[in-house]
Image (cartoon, helix red, strand yellow):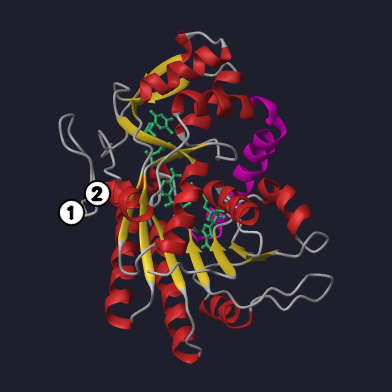
Amino acid sequence: MAPFTPHCVLVTGGAGFIGSNLVRWLLEHAPDLRVINLDLLTYAGNLESLSDVTTRHGASGDRRYGFVRGDITDLRLVRGLLRDGLQGGRGAPPVPPPDAVVHLAAESHVDRSIMGPAVFVDTNVRGTLTLLEACRAELAERPRPFRFVHVSTDEVYGSLGPGDPPFTEATSLAPNSPYAASKAAADLLVRAYVETFGVPAVTTRCSNNYGPFQFPEKLIPLMITRALADQPLPVYGDGMNVRDWIHVDDHAEALWAVLTRGATGRVYNIGGESEVPNLEIVRTILRALRKPESLIQFVNDRPGHDRRYAMDITRIRTELGWTPRRRLVDGLPATVEWYLTHREWWERVLNEAYRAANALYLEGRA
Ligand code: NAD
Ligand code: TYD
């Protein structure tokens, strides 16, 4: 199959952890590509994660990048972006109508989904539906080569026991948290829009990402930032839950492979082939920071806590030639180092983000 060559990608959630790393990766690796980043800037979105990108590729750079603050549930806004791109004006550069969407915008934290599931349905389910509907309508009016990449998670498959084989794309969906359920619902809507309306969509399901610019509520940055402050490290249950870890740059590279060479209607698992119990991650971080293990505090388990995730990545490896390249033994210390040298980023994120989050939740969106 001939590769698909996108000219302009609409990235949703580009100010989040994976989104900001992906936007940077795309602009570096695809020299002719333009990127529009649509992000609501919730507590998890942060334009400071993209300040280098804005300088290099925004209005005063090579003009390949533009940002729009907005909600993926806003159909008018999304339809306008797909139809017109960015018009420019007030010194901002025009960016042409996108011929691809890479959809990452989401509420992404399991613990928050347990405290307040409604916003997860709103953003992850209704937001995905809105994007699909906007693409369907746009392509009906102005047919053109197009791809929609829906970025999903291994969590839709549920939980594995210690001896179970890894998840394949044929594994049944069995989500256990409201977060996972909302992502699974979105996956099924994507499938329905492919089958019913012929929207050229592909779904990816990836395991746990780590790397720079991850919000310090997720395991790795939470443990690093708390250990640096000599605060207790809350390990859920017995600490023996297993996650498969992948460096965020490997995920970005996999998304590019899927965008340019993936078959529409297909699902691709993405993983790091790196299964590690949580306690081992926490101990490695403590060793890297020369902090004592006495900081570890076992706390009540997360309700519905999935025991183990593992991904079979045969399909993406054999069909698209992608394979994870960064090893956790190198990537985890490098990530610890990144948080050590970017204190300003995470200290500000923690202060400002939590204030903004509270405002958002008080406004009744959650
Ligand atoms: P994140 O929470 O860091 O970022 C999410 C981004 O989406 C934020 O910038 C936020 O402002 C934006 N957003 C939220 N609601 C929005 C809305 N209504 N409209 C527009 N923008 C909105 O998340 P992440 O960890 O970068 O994850 C990105 C995507 O990848 C998610 O879809 C997630 O389900 C998926 N995923 C994440 C992982 C992981 O390990 N982090 C693994 C597999 C899949
Ligand atoms: P997390 O980073 O929230 O990702 P996910 O739940 O989507 O896999 O959590 C990773 C693992 O770490 C998960 O098994 C829960 C555990 N965990 C803790 O033990 N303590 C914590 O404070 C957090 C945030 C997570």
Is residue 144 shown to the viewer in this render? yes
- The residue depicted at 61 percent of the width and 19 percent of the height is 229
Callout 2 amino acid: Tyr
Which image quadrant for residue 337?
Answer: top right
Total residue callouts: 2
Callout 1 amino acid: Ser
Q: Which secondary structure class fits the magenta region best? A: helix
Proximity of marks 1 and 2: CB atoms separated by less than 8 Å: yes
Q: Is residue 176 toward the left or the right of residue 247 in the image?
A: left
Asked whether residue 358 is drawn in magenta, I would say yes
Residue sitting nearer the eye, 215 or 329: 329
Q: Quadrant of the N terminus?
A: bottom left
Which image quadrant for residue 362?
Answer: bottom right
Dot 1 falls on a residue whose secondary structure is loop
Per the rendered image, the range of residues in magenta is 340-366
The single residue placed furthest to the bottom in the displayed view is: 141
Q: Is residue 50 above or below residue 124?
A: above
Asked whether residue 322 is drawn in magenta, I would say no
- The residue depicted at 52 percent of the width and 48 percent of the height is 18
The single residue placed furthest to the front in the displayed view is: 2
Residue 248, percent across and down? 50, 42
Q: Is residue 365 above or below residue 196?
A: above
Dot 2 falls on a residue whose secondary structure is helix
Q: Residues within 10 Å of mark 2 (few under 14, many from 20)?
A: many
Q: Is residue 197 above or below residue 112?
A: below
Residue 158, percent across and down? 24, 45
Q: Mark 1 to mark 2: distance in Å?
A: 6 Å
- The residue depicted at 51 percent of the width and 78 percent of the height is 75
Residue at mark 1: 172
Residue sitting nearer the eye, 312 or 325: 325
Residue at mark 2: 157
Is residue 177 shown to the viewer in this render? no
